[in-house]
Image: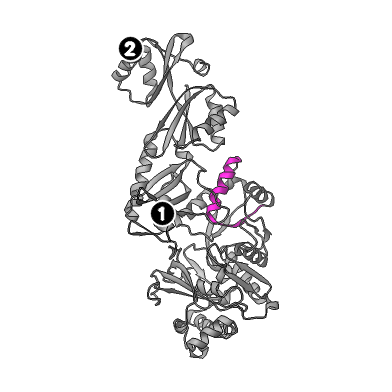
């Protein structure tokens, strides 16, 4: 199962930069990311990395609160309604998405959606039913 | 094996102990009268040791304050010729003259004996390897524990403060069994163990901690014991009363026996300055009765505590002081409420999701005073889900509000974000405008 790295960060100048510095030093490549702040002075950074285990290890060693969370990455046709088609299947399955982010993969002419949800196995089934494909771990880490 | 370092003194029946104290107090007053300060005070107030008929009569003697010590800096309290002095220690003196204490040979002997007695009471013996992780030099915790542990006969490691990696190397190489340090440092030390892939429970021979010189809660002690698999004992000392070794927990871990053959402890109502009944909180007032070079009579410590009523199962007759509720000068007032930092600490320690480090910042934001509480998030509890953090935020805020009646601004910060002090941890920073004007 594919994984992303989630990091707890204080919402202060320079804190995100320190994270990217740690990753750069270990030559870890970021495939996609989101940063969401809270009203309380902190936020959570989600990173899709080419080597999540190494990235997680490097960040924990640098003193961060970081965890690996299971995700599923779905390939969507890059056209209007592409995301809607996928979501209509997921909502039928009563899937509650905790966090999601999308990015384009120009070389494939497709877009991908990274999904963090409670019931990953069910999401996988629904994706199949929708006639869409899920990216393998290899494909994700070498996007 | 004996339980006591000095059985006769430690288990002396109360009536006998009080008679002993009265005799020592009178002798101490005669000695004190040789200092310029007490000579003047006794003359002006017509004080005569012969007027004391019971130990309770100590309340007729004048109190001594920190200002008196500072105002008569450095030699105003000295009772012996300078060439008889063999050591001095002093406080940091961040707000004026430092408080300087002088010791002659008798005083050092008496002091190190009391520290040895404390270490013996927690179960340390001459077979132990004792590592003293605190500042040496002017701070009394360094040499005070050093001398006491040597007197006990333990192998001593004067490793002093700082360099946690070397501290761990020393304790693993030499098989350290007993450590003296400040409680906030142990949390830091544990982090370094973890960073090195070590578990102190498995990779050391540690069995006893003596912790003190920094107020801490019962919850914090339990957490330290849990982390290291070591029993931790609370220690009380202050430079004005020699340093460490004034009061110490025994194996019962319930209150600190104050060594009443060397000190007279009183608990007074800080407003009326009248004694409060046993069990009631008040200000601790201390008198030395076994010190020659610089006796101090009825010193106002500004520490708030109480005598624990009843007898201790350990058999020692010396009364026990409760964990300190704070200092009369630590208390701050915010939005009209009196708050002691220890009240906040007690609440924070109920939450395993936050580490033992915290900071209270008082600030004026857009003309309104606010209390910020910064806590470090314990990374073991991070799941990557914001709901978990938000719920912790709300729980901390309401728990503090319920206790002190002021709603704090809670700030959960990254692990390691709060400053680690080499000495005592700075728990409260007051940046309020009203304060700056003073």
Q: Position of residue B353 (x, y in %)?
A: 43, 43
Q: Identify the magenta region.
A: B175-197
Q: Nearer the viewer, residue B410 or B380?
A: B410
- Can residue B209 be seen here? yes
Q: Quadrant of the N terminus of chain B?
A: bottom right
Please give left or right for residue A39 compared with residue B378 in the image.
left
Secondary element at image label 1? loop
Q: Position of residue B417 (x, y in %)?
A: 50, 43
Residue positioned 50% across, 35% down in the render: A14
Residue positioned 67% across, 62% down in the render: B154
Residue extending farthest right:
B83
The chain letter under disc 1 is: B
Q: Quick check: is B186 in the magenta stretch?
A: yes
Q: Which residue is mark 1?
A: B432
Q: Quick check: is B212 in the magenta stretch?
A: no
Q: Which mark is residue A81?
A: 2
Quadrant in which residue B160 is drawn: bottom right
Q: Position of residue A141 (x, y in %)?
A: 52, 19
Secondary element at image label 2? loop
- Can residue B4 be seen here? no
Compared to A63, does B59 lie above or below?
A: below
The chain letter under disc 2 is: A
Compared to B106, does B344 lie above or below?
A: above
Residue extending farthest bottom:
B50
Q: Nearer the viewer, residue B204 or A31?
A: A31
Q: Nearer the viewer, residue B362 or B378?
A: B362
Residue positioned 35% across, 40% down in the render: B391
Q: Quadrant of the C terminus of chain B?
A: bottom left
> Are tags 1 and 2 found on a single chain?
no
Tell me whether the residue at label 1 lies in contact with that at label 2, contact meaning CB atoms closer than 8 angstroms.
Answer: no
């Amino acid at each position: 199962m594919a994984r992303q790295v989630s990091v707890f960060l204080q919402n202060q100048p320079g804190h995100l930069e320190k994270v990217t510095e740690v990753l750069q030093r270990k030559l870890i490549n970021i495939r996609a990311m989101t940063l969401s702040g809270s009203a309380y002075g902190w936020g959570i950074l989600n990173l899709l990395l080419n080597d999540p285990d190494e990235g997680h290890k490097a960040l924990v060693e640098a003193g961060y609160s970081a965890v690996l969370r299971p995700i599923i990455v779905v390939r969507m046709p890059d056209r209007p309604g592409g995301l809607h088609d996928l979501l209509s299947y997921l909502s039928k399955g009563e899937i509650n998405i905790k966090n999601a982010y999308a990015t384009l993969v120009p070389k494939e002419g497709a877009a991908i959606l990274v999904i963090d949800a409670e019931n990953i196995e069910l999401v996988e089934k629904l994706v199949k039913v929708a006639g869409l494909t899920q990216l393998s771990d290899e494909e994700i880490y070498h996007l | 094996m004996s339980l006591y370092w000095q059985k006769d003194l430690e288990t002396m029946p109360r009536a006998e102990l009080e008679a002993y104290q009265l005799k020592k107090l009178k002798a101490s007053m005669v000695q004190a009268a040789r200092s310029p300060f007490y000579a003047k005070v006794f003359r002006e107030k017509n004080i005569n040791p012969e007027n004391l008929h019971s130990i309770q009569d100590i309340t007729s003697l004048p109190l001594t304050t920190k200002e008196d010590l500072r105002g008569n800096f450095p030699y105003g309290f000295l009772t012996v010729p300078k060439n008889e002095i063999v050591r001095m220690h002093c406080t940091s003196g961040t707000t004026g003259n430092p408080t300087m204490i002088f010791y002659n040979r008798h005083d050092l002997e008496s002091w190190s004996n009391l520290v040895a007695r404390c270490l013996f009471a927690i179960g340390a013996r001459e077979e132990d390897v004792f590592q003293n992780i605190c500042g040496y030099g002017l701070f009394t915790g360094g040499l005070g524990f050093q001398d006491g542990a040597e007197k006990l006969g333990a192998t001593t490691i004067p490793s002093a403060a700082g360099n946690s990696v070397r501290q761990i190397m020393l304790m693993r190489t030499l098989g350290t069994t007993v450590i003296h340090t400040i409680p906030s440092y142990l949390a830091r030390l544990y982090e370094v163990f973890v960073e090195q892939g070590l578990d102190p429970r498995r990779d050391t021979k540690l069995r006893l901690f003596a912790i003190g010189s920094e107020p801490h809660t019962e919850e914090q002690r339990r957490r330290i014991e849990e982390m290291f698999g070591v029993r931790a004992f609370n220690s009380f000392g202050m430079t004005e009363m020699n340093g460490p070794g004034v009061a110490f927990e025994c194996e019962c871990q319930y209150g600190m026996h104050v060594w009443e053959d060397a000190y007279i402890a009183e608990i007074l109502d800080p407003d009326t300055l009248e004694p409060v009944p046993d069990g009631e909180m008040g200000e601790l007032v201390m008198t030395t009765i076994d010190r020659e070079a610089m006796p101090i009579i009825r010193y106002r410590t500004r520490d708030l505590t109480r005598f624990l009523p009843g007898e201790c199962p350990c058999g020692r007759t010396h009364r026990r002081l409760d964990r300190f509720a704070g200092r009369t000068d630590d208390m701050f007032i915010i939005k009209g409420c009196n708050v002691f930092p220890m009240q906040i600490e007690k609440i924070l320690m109920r939450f395993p999701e936050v580490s033992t480090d915290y900071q209270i910042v008082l600030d004026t934001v857009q003309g309104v005073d606010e209390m910020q509480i910064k806590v470090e998030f314990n990374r073991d509890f991070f799941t990557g889900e914001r709901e978990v953090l938000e719920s912790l935020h709300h729980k901390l805020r309401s728990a503090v509000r319920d206790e002190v009646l002021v709603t704090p601004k809670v700030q959960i910060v990254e692990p390691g974000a709060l400053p680690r002090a080499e000495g005592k941890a700075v728990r409260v920073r007051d940046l309020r405008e009203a304060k700056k004007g003073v």
